[in-house]
Image (spheres, rainbow, N blue to C red):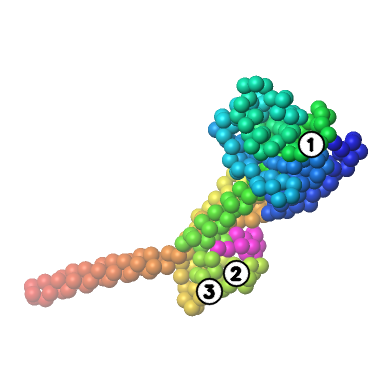
Amino acid sequence: MPETNKFQALLVSISNTLIQASPENIGEAIEDCLGQIGLSYGASRVGFSRIDENDHSFMVHQWSLGDRPPLPQSWDLAHLPLFGRYIAEGHSLLLNGKDDLPEDAQAERALMERLGTVALLTCPVDLKDFLIGSFFMASTTPRSVWTESTVEEIKILGASLGIAYTRGLVSSELARTNEQYRRVVEDQTELIVRWEPDGTRTWMNDRYCEFFGEPRQNLVGSSLFPFVHPDDHAGFRELISSLTVVFPVATAEHRVVLPNGNIGWQAWTSRGRFDESGSLVEIQSVGRDITAMKRAEADTHERAEFQSLLTRVSVTSQVVVYKAGTR
């Protein structure tokens, strides 16, 4: 067992290892720390397990001395009632030999014999009274006895590993969520663009780039105003001015200059993002091309006007014929 100064040095080493690890490498860092703990305390195996709501223990990280085979990944604590009860109740368990087990702990005794375990120490790992897993340390060779001081030290080390493990989970989940969001956004048929109040574009999805026929690197950092019809610039700026903390969303239709030089139409819904002082810092707009719809509306309007003209011409002709016939 490390002395106090050795424990402090071990704790510093483990803390530095975990702090310096990137979210992608936190698993490797935890296993490195398990190895440091195992060697410091003369253990043959050290592991960190996650416990789910069904009392199943999943070995997420483990270290073993030499070429010992890894332990099973999944354990049903219902089949190890003594271990399960201690962990669930938030208690540590220290066994310096199978003789320390109560007589009714037959499943645990059989497990220790099967693994050749001489001594075992387990402790729960919780964060703010929420149980996330357990830490264990086992020895398969005769060694100095672990004490209650060892238990207290392992609790501290286990808590550090628990925090790191949780940080890794959060980072992985965030990365997965961001990737899902990115895929959803990129798969959208709508045009999506983020831009600053002066018109500078900061991000856009693939569909936006495809529509305007430019690679993303050419669009990021450039103004979106050249794509807006000059006669609609004033209305576009009015839309920006209309966005407030109370009313952060606005919709508008405006003409755009298409890649082929023709004039098209787009419909946009824009949402402003504001800083703590209420100043507009960024706008995200989701738009769609409505050129075909506008052309259809124009054709319908032209046909209606033409039909109205034909009707007026027909009526006029009938009046002229009628008057001519009465002479």
Q: Residue at x 66, y 34 (%)?
A: 113
Which quadrant holds the C terminus? Answer: bottom left
Q: Residue at x 50, y 78 (%)?
A: 261
Q: Residue type at mark 3?
A: Gly
Instruction: Inspect the magenta stretch and tell me whether residue 252 lies in it.
Output: no
Element type at mark 1: loop
Count the labels in the image: 3
Q: Which residue is mark 1?
A: 142
- The CA span between labels 3 and 1 is 73 Å
Q: Which mark is residue 216?
A: 2
Q: Residue at x 63, y 50 (%)?
A: 172
Classify mark 2: residues with Cα within 10 Å, few (<14), some (14-19) or many (20+): some
- The CA span between labels 2 and 3 is 10 Å
Q: Residue type at mark 2?
A: Arg
Image height of 54 relative to 229, above or below: above
Residue 136: give x, y in percent of width and height: 71, 36
Q: Which residue is mark 3?
A: 213
- The CA span between labels 2 and 1 is 65 Å
Element type at mark 2: helix
* Residue interval drawn in magenta: 194-205
Q: Residue type at mark 1?
A: Pro
The answer, for residue 161, to whether it is visible in the render is no
Of 8 and 177, which appears nearest the observer?
Answer: 8
Residue 70: give x, y in percent of width and height: 65, 46
Of the two numbered discs 3 and 1 on the same chain, state the one appearing first in sequence. Answer: 1
